[in-house]
Image (spheres, grey):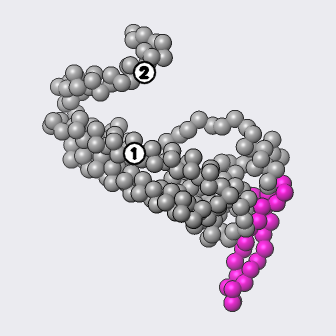
Amino acid sequence: MPDRELSTTGYLTLGLLAAGDWSAYQLAEQLGRGVSELWPSADRGRYAVLGRLHEAGYVDTRQEHTGKRARTVYSITSSGREALASWLSTPVRAPTLEFEGMVRVLFSDQGSIEDLRRTLAQTREQALANREMFARYAAFISATGGTFPERRHLFALANTFMIGHYDHVVAWADWAEQQIESWPDTVTPATTHEAQVRDMLAPGRAAWQVAGHTED
């Protein structure tokens, strides 16, 4: 285990620096190339984590000048590489999901049916845009090797997951819009559309049974 435990954002930053030296601005650029979709908090905490990495001895800093402007450039140390390698050998945390649209769906009974329809439409639009972004990355990596050609085989694994993830979100939004088409509001279907609700829950009940469980 590393001498000092870091957040996932810290290890992510070390992973980026393992490929080369970067300024804080350049790290932000890398986070904007699909990384923030995998770990949203990385972008929010990137400046604070650099200070913690430096304090822990996992990165070194140097000043570079372009004209009169100075910038701090970060490079990973041998201790940082050891910490990163140690972290990669530990058990992985279970996947989590940060999905505001779904949170809004859960509380849609406090709003209008129009609000719910708008949430689903915006969710689809966002997923389509993100899917296009990862498809563009796939084409770029395939044609040029990408920004990190030595990691393109690993990016291919992650890219395929992200494309499939957004395919699923788009398909779910389409399905959900069809389900609520006949709903007059976001409250009464709990009692007026009981058969439909049971049909929607059928795949979950089937998965429960396949796992060897029985319904109470």
**On the image, numbered disc 1 is attached to which residue?**
167
Mark 2 lies on a secondary structure that is: helix
Q: Which residues are magenta?
A: 53-79
Indicate whether residue 62 is drawn in magenta.
Answer: yes
Identify the residue shown where x is 51% and y is 47%: 160
In which image quadrant can residue 28 be found? bottom right
Q: Is residue 30 left or right of residue 65?
A: left
Along the viewing direction, whichever of 151 and 100 lies nearer the viewer: 151
Tag of residue 207: 2
Q: Amino acid at mark 2?
A: Ala
110 shown above or below 76: above
- Describe residue 128's horizontal placement relative to residue 55 as left or right: left
* Separation (CA) of disc 1 from disc 2: 21 Å
The image shows residue 42 at horizontal and vertical percentages of 59, 55
Crowding at dot 2, Cα within 10 Å, few <14 / some 14-19 / many 20+, comes out as few
Quadrant location, the N terminus: top right
Q: Residue at x 72, y 65 (%)?
A: 20
Q: Secondary structure at mark 1?
A: helix
Residue 113 seen in the current view: yes
